[in-house]
Amino acid sequence: MPNGARQVASRRTEDALVYLPHKSVVEYRRGQVIYDESQPSNGIYLVVRGRVKTSVPMDDGSQTVIEIFAAEDFFGESGLLELPQRGESAVALENTSLMAWSTAEIEEQVDRQPKLGLAFIQTLVERCLDFEERLQSFALDKTPERIMRALLRFANRFGTRAEDGSVRIPPMTHQLISEYVGTSREIVTFQMNRLRQEGFIRYSRKGIDVYTEPLAENLRRITEPGLWRATGGNEPGAGAFSGGII
C-alpha cells in the first residue's frame, strides 16, 4: 500500500451508514446483473451480504474487473454523475443482499447531514489511492507479481484468519482473477499452480487459503531484492518461486 493510502487509512473516517436512512434489502442471485450499460446505476449500493464485481468491457470483448466488493462496501458511485453513457456493469458473484439509495436521496441526505458527504469523499479518496497502487502494479509488475498482490489484497480486504496462520478468501475462479489482473485464465492457472506447489497458497471449492506473510516476503524478494537483503533476507534456494516472466 502506498504511504498516502496508509496515512488516509490511519485517520478517523466518517461512517456513511450512520447518516443514511435504512432501506429494504434487495436480494440478487449469483450471476444476476445489478446494473449495466442498458440499465445503469442511478445511485449508491451497499453490500449487506455476499460479493459483487464491477467491470468494464474491452474492445476485444473481454472484461476488466474494476473492483470486487464485500459486506459493508459501497459501490455504484458512477450513478451520482448521471452520465448518459456508462460502460460499467455490476454482477453478483454469489447470492447477495443489497441496499440502495437513489441520487436524489443521497443529495437530500447530504443537505441534512453534511458529514455524509465527507464520508463519501473519504471513501472515494481511499479508493483512488488504491487504484493508483493497482495502476503502478500494472505498469511495473510482471503477471506473477500482479497475481500475488491481488491475492494479498483480497486476503486483507475480506479474508478470514485460520488457526494455521493462513487467510481464507472466498472462492474465486481463475477467470475472475485473470479479469482483475489483466491476463488470460490459462496464465492465472499456471501461476496459481506454481504458488500452490511452493506452499504459498492452497485452494479448493471452499476457497483460497493464502499464507500471507510468506507470500508477502516472497513478493518483496522479487520486487525489492536490494531492500530485502539489507533487512536480513537471504538468497533463496534453487526451488524458491521466482515468479517467471509470463
Image (tube, helix red, strand yellow):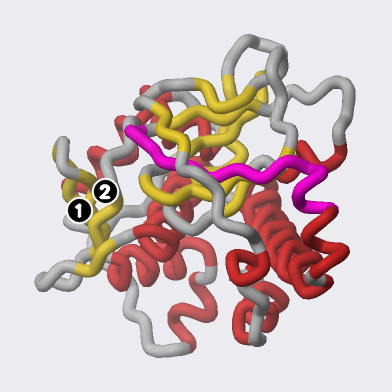
Task: Give the x, y percent position of residue 65.
Answer: 57, 34
Work out which residue is located at the far left of the displayed protein and give it.
163
**Could you tell me how far apart the alpha carbons at marks 1 and 2 are, in whole angstroms?**
5 Å
Give the x, y percent position of residue 221: 43, 68
x 53%, y 77%: residue: 226
Labelled pair 1, 2 in contact (Cβ < 8 Å): yes
- Note whether residue 82 is visible: yes
Q: According to the image, label 2 marks what residue?
A: 195
Quadrant housing the N terminus: bottom right
Name the foreground residue: 218 vs 156.
156
Identify which residue is drawn at 67% across, 77% down: 14
Mark 2 residue crowding within 10 angstroms, few (<14) / some (14–19) / many (20+): many
Q: Please tell me which residue is depicted at 62% across the width and 10% down the height of the picture.
A: 61
Secondary-structure class at tag 2: helix
- Can you say whether 165 is above or below 88 in the image? below
Q: Which residue is mark 1?
A: 198
The answer to whether 236 is drawn above or below residue 74 in the figure is below
* Residue 16 pos. (x, y %): 65, 66
Q: What is the three-letter code of the residue carrying label 1?
A: Glu
Q: Residue at x 36, y 81 (%)?
A: 233
Whether the magenta-drawn stretch holds residue 108 is answered as no
User: Per the image, is 98 magenta?
Assistant: yes
Looking at the picture, which amino acid does disc 2 mark? Leu
Q: Name the quadrant containing residue 81.
A: top right
What element does badge 1 sit on?
Answer: loop
Q: Examine the rendered structure and indicate whether residue 47 appears above or below residue 55.
A: below
Q: Which mark is residue 52?
A: none
What are the residue bounds of the magenta stretch? Answer: 94-107
